[in-house]
Each structure stands twice: as structure tokens, then as C-alpha cells.
Image (cartoon, rainbow, N blue to C red):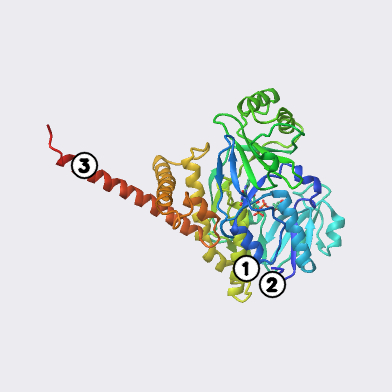
Amino acid sequence: MAQRGYKVDVFEQRQQPKPTDTRSHRSYPMVLSSRSTHGLKEAGLQLPLPGPQSAFLTLTGRLDLIREDDEYSKQYIVDRVTFGKHMYEATHQRYGSRITWHWGHALQHVDFDRRVATFSSSDPAAALSQGSTLQGSNADAPATSTTTSVSYELLIGADGAGSKVRQLMQGAVAGMKVDTKYFSSTTYKTYHGLSLRQGSEEPLPGFASHAPGQFIYNFNVKGMPTLVMWRQADNTASGMLTRARSYDAQELRTKISSAYLQIPPEWVESIVAQTCDTSGQPPSPFGKLMSTTRLDGPRCVLLGDAGHPMTSTLAQGCNLALESVRIFARILDSVSGDLDQAPAAFTSARLEDVHAMQTIEYMQILSSNAPGANANALEQMIAKATMLGSALFSQGLHKLMPSSFPAPVYLLDGLRDARVPYKKVLQTMQMHAVALIALAATLAGISSQVLQLVPQS
Ligand SMILES: Cc1cc2nc3c(=O)[nH]c(=O)nc-3n(C[C@H](O)[C@H](O)[C@H](O)COP(=O)(O)OP(=O)(O)OC[C@H]3O[C@@H](n4cnc5c(N)ncnc54)[C@H](O)[C@@H]3O)c2cc1C
């Protein structure tokens, strides 16, 4: 919006981030693809991304190589907090004169007819200095808070999976329905600041010589807590602990050190100390998958997780969010900046694709038997047949004609390519699965014919 000359006010419920936040529980790794980098490029933003990711490196040292032939196959590993900081700095530097940031302002209410949004703030001095109208204290907000009402021309709800804008739209916008398809019961905790002592053995081959953001390291033994690690810009390793059944220090220490012999003992101690600290942050869930029937209301639009909450199962939430931003900007241009038309035009252009991505994620959740998925047997069978069928068929094509089909698993390649709409990815996977089933049925038919031709003794 600022790029197109609008004056933008950003209201964020949290306070302005501090440098130490890179070691907070919100600092987890995100894999960004061309869907994100193209979004940033079209918005005129240059972010200091680390070098492209080379591979997933598993405990056994097996390299799952990532293709990086062109800008559409490259991926980047960023930590969420640093990425947010870089986004803030880049927008501030490029469009600072048109953007006002209001930290510590939580949206409470929207009057969609009068186009007024009301925020509570625990920092009245900040609210006053922004020149807003203070309207007295709010009964729902903490005692010291004040409310600020702001008139708007267009309200963009980019307030995440628990979006207040979306909740308020549900009561005010005809035809707006929200369905929670899946709520992940798996949780994670993060840990930070692991460094290799001089002369210590590497936890994985080549670890000491890898560049920041070059690899994601997976320590994943069935039935054991899982550790995912990545290298930060300061060369220390950060990571996420998931699937821990309990945060009892002794139990966790024993499990990690027996399952992952390569991890240096001082790292195990640091991971246990950081994740079992009961005074710290409780474990965070991996999110929820919710689908909406609309992404728009009158002079109002939902972008990012607010419009399409995702889990991290296929690492698409941020990619989908930045792609939605790019598409909304294009829609705005196509209706010559008409703010009455743009929101509904956005739903028409984007919703099918968003639902396609959510269907792919849901199928992945079902086919991996993730706990909490509440589907019937037929849905589960279709999901498994599609995911497995597509993986096998695309691997077969890759083996037979590697230059025409460079990616062994089409899904992974399709998802990261900004030129391929998500609905095309879904259709192709369904086509693969049907082709494989047809091929298997034909082969079964031929072999039964052959068996009939063989004389019975
Ligand atoms: C462990 C994990 C790993 C992930 N990995 C990946 C990955 O590899 N690749 C990928 O693409 N995605 C990944 N994701 C998903 C990604 O993090 C999200 O999709 C992305 O952060 C969504 O961005 P957003 O701006 O829409 O929402 P958010 O990042 O949630 O931001 C919303 C903002 O709105 C603020 N807010 C909320 N309510 C209010 C209110 N009432 N008033 C004012 N402000 C409010 C919040 O404080 C927050 O700052 C991962 C998620 C998790 C949890």
C-alpha cells in the first residue's frame, strides 16, 4: 500500500521487538521459497537473506539435495524473528515516510459501516503522540489501558491465525464462514546459542564448515523427541524440540543423549536447561488449519494467516502470506485503486488457490497419521492414495526422463515455484495418482490375461 502512495498505519499488539528476541520462543526456522522472494521483490524490498539452502541433512548424514537451478527452485532458511526485524527495517527504509507504526495497540472492535477501528493500548503517551482520538477506558482491556479509535479507508487484517479482524467479520459480513479443519496437538519449544567448542566432534559431518542458513539439520528417531537445528548468522546453532512427551529434565536428557549420540553433551545440557525451564514460555502448538469462505468484507481484506491459517506441516504459511500480498497488490492495480472493488476481487482471484494449498496440507496431515486429525476412513484413503501415488509417479518420471522431470518429488518442487498456482500443484498430484492407479490396473489386467494364456498343467 505504501509503495502505491497510500498512507499506512500499522497497529501491532506487541511492543517494538528487541534484539534479544532472536533468542525467544518465537524464533523458529522458516523455509522461504520464490513465492516469498517474488512477493518481496515486487514490493520493492531487499532483505539480507542468507545464501540459498543446500539440503536437509538428516541424522544419518543422508543429504536430501535441494535443486537450486534457478530463482524458482531456491529456498532460504530464516528465523522468524530476524525475518520480521528485516521486514520492518526494509519497509521503514524504503517507505518510512508513509508508514506510522503503533506498537502495543491491540484491535478490540471494528465498526464496518462507519469504518472505524478501535484499539486498546497500555501506553497512553504513545497513543496520544500518534494524534489519535482517545475515547476513555475500555472495560475489556487492562485497567491502565486506553482505547484509540481510528477511521480508515481500507482495513487490512494481517493479524495472524487468531485474527480479531476475521472474528469480527464473521458477525458482520454476509456469507463469511470459518471452518477449523485441524488443530495440531504437537508442540515445540525453541533453544538457542549452541556453539561448537574448539576440538569438539561435529554433531553431523561437515557441520563446522557449513554457512549460516545453508542446511536444516534433522535429528529424528521414531518414538523419540525430535530436534531440528539451523545455523544463525553468528554461527551458533538454534533449534526446535518437538514431540517431547514430557519436559522432565532427567527424562529428556536421557532420551536425547541415547537417541542422538552425535550431539555434544554440553549441547544436550543447554537444550534441556532451556526447554525444561518451568518459569519460561510454555510449549507452543504448531498451529491450526482453518478455511474461510471469504477473504473480504466491505473495505476490508484478510491477508496471511488471518485469511488462511496453516500449520507448519509443509512450510507454506509465510510463503502463502507473501504471495497473497503480491496478488492483492496486483488486484488493486487491476481495479485502478478502487477500494470498494478490490477486496471482493481479491477473494475471487485468490480463494480457490488458498483452498487448494490447504487441501494439500490437510492430505499431508492425514497421510502422515498426525494425531488430532479427525477424518473418516474414505477421506484418509483418498489422501494417502494421492500423496503416495503422486510421489511414486513423479519419482518414476524423474528416473525415466530426468531432464524433463528434474525433481524426484513433484510436490516439493511445485510448492516452491511461484509460477505454479497451488491449484495447479493439487491438480497435477491428483493426475499423477490417477495415472498410477490406471497404470497399475492395466498391468494387473495384462498379467491376468497372460496367466490365462499359460496352459494349466
Ligand atoms: C514452528 C513453525 C514453523 C514454520 N515454518 C514455516 C516455514 O518454513 N515456511 C513458511 O512459509 N511458513 C512457516 N510457518 C508459518 C509462518 O510462521 C506463518 O504462516 C506466518 O508467520 C504468518 O504471518 P502473518 O503475518 O500472517 O501472521 P503472524 O506472523 O502471526 O503475525 C500477526 C501479527 O499480528 C499481531 N496481532 C494479532 N492480533 C492482534 C490484534 N488484535 N491487534 C493488533 N495486532 C495483533 C500479532 O502480534 C503478530 O505480530 C511456520 C510456523 C511455525 C509455528
Return the disc, 3 or 2, that comes first in the chain's sequence: 2
Residue at x 64% of width, y 48% of height: 30
Identify the residue position indicated by label 2 in the image.
Answer: 4
Q: Say if mark 2 contacts mark 1, CB within 8 Å.
A: yes
Secondary structure, mark 1, is helix
Q: Which mark is residue 252?
A: none
Q: Single out the residue that lies furthest toward the bottom.
A: 336
3 vs 2, front mark: 3
Return the disc, 2 or 1, that comes first in the chain's sequence: 2
Query: In the figure, 30 relative to 421: above or below?
Result: above
Amino acid at pointer 2? Arg
Identify the residue position indicated by label 1 in the image.
Answer: 329
Task: Name the foreground residue: 385 vs 73.
Answer: 73
Distance in Å between CA atoms under marks 3 and 2: 66 Å
Q: Classify mark 3: residues with Cα within 10 Å, few (<14), some (14-19) or many (20+).
A: few
Query: In the figure, 48 relative to 94: above or below?
Result: above
Distance in Å between CA atoms under marks 1 and 3: 57 Å
